[in-house]
Image (cartoon, helix red, strand yellow):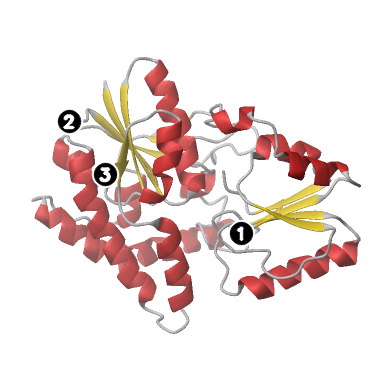
């Protein structure tokens, strides 16, 4: 079967989809990976065909975070561009596919599958994407709300999605001669079966989730980079004293990297720890740092984390 996979977002959205793609390829299917240009090397390194979709995510997120204070409507403009690019690129990338699986902020996937007349599935990496009385909608900071408040948050969230995305989605659907949609959440996340790639014990689906959810467990693959030992200099730093603390925010940018670095460094020094700062998209680690703190780039978490005293992580892949 010819299967198109499209995960749009940061590495936490793309990497699990790569694991799915490799598993499908090993079972004899013809798989293509559609992802932002940032992840071309990541996809090619694991041996899947790569089709670029949309803009450079790192640049887009950084610019949006920088502009949002001066230009409060910047996210609306960016979302309009994201949807336009997604439709244009996905039409080409999915040509000849027999099934399409979307993930992350893949807004065009369900519409492209409808236009092609093929099945569509959405891959969710956490149960919070499912409407439920048991938890609030995504982006709500307070988690211990009563059921009625959770329902209210979902009501508000769906209307927010409609305000931000519906006009652009319906504009692009009209170009494909597709009928307009009324509810963005239903179209983007609940068109067809949802593959819920979470641990059934640590993060089971809520018991009031409606039908059409298939729990699968997490999706992992053996990254060739994880077979390599840690850099000798990094390994020597870790061994040269008590186990350090890892601090990293992955693909999350920082509005003020210098200020965030100072806050992290002050906290580390106050606790008397050694530490590794992952530079990441937040740009941690510029400037003079104490000898007990080392800045690192991309490194295998599987190799690094077992040697840490503690891990402060943003929760991505």
Which label sits on residue 169? none
- Label 3 neighbour load within 10 Å: few <14, some 14-19, many 20+: many
Q: Secondary structure at mark 3?
A: helix
**SS at mark 2 in the image:** loop
Measuring from the top left, give residue 246's x and y in whole percent: 75, 51
Q: Position of residue 138 (x, y in %)?
A: 51, 57
- The residue to which callout 3 is attached is 110
278 is higher (above) or lower (below) than 79: above
| Residue 283 seen from this side | yes
Coordinates of residue 72 in the picture (x, y in percent): 41, 80
**Residue beneath the point at 68% across and 70% down:** 260
Q: Is residue 214 visible?
A: no
Mark 1: give few (<14), some (14-19) or many (20+) Cα within 10 Å.
few
Q: Earlier in the sequence, mark 2 or mark 3?
A: 2
Q: Which residue is drawn at the image coordinates 19% and 52% (left, top)?
A: 88
Q: In the image, is 103 to the left or to the right of 118?
A: right
Residue that mark 2 sits on: 96
Q: Earlier in the sequence, mark 1 or mark 3?
A: 3
**Distance from Cα at disc 2 to Cα at disc 3:** 16 Å
Give the residue number, with chain letter if any, for mark 1. Answer: 146
Q: Work out which residue is located at the far bottom of the displayed protein and give it.
A: 70
Which tag, 1 or 2, sits closer to the chain's start? 2
């Amino acid at each position: 079967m010819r299967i198109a996979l499209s995960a749009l977002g940061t590495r936490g959205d793309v990497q699990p989809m790569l694991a799915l793609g490799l598993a499908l390829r090993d079972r004899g299917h013809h798989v293509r990976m559609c992802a932002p240009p940032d992840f071309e090397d990541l996809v090619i390194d694991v041996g899947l065909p790569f089709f670029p979709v949309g803009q450079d995510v790192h640049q887009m997120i950084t610019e949006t975070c920088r502009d949002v204070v001066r230009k409060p409507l910047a996210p609306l403009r960016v979302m309009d561009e994201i949807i336009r690019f997604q439709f244009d690129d996905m039409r080409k990338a999915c040509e000849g596919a027999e099934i399409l699986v979307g993930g992350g902020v893949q807004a065009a996937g369900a519409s492209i599958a409808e236009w092609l007349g093929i099945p569509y599935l959405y891959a969710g990496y956490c149960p919070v994407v499912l409407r439920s009385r048991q938890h609030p909608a995504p982006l709500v900071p307070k988690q211990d709300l009563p059921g009625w408040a959770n329902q209210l948050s979902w009501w508000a969230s769906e209307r927010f999605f409609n305000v931000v995305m519906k006009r652009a989605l319906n504009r692009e659907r009209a170009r494909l001669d597709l009928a307009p949609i009324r509810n963005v959440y239903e179209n983007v996340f609940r068109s067809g079966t949802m593959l819920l790639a979470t641990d059934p014990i640590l993060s089971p689906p809520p018991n009031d989730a409606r039908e059409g959810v298939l729990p699968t467990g997490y999706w992992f693959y053996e990254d060739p980079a994880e077979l390599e030992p840690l850099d000798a200099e990094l390994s020597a730093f870790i061994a040269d004293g008590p186990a350090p603390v890892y601090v990293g925010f992955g693909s999350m940018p920082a509005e003020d990297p210098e200020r965030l670095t100072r806050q992290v460094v002050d906290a580390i020094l106050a606790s008397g720890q050694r530490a590794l700062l992952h530079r990441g998209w937040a740009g941690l680690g510029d400037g003079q740092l104490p000898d007990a703190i080392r800045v690192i780039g991309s490194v295998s978490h599987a190799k690094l984390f077992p040697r840490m005293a503690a891990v402060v992580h943003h929760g991505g892949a």
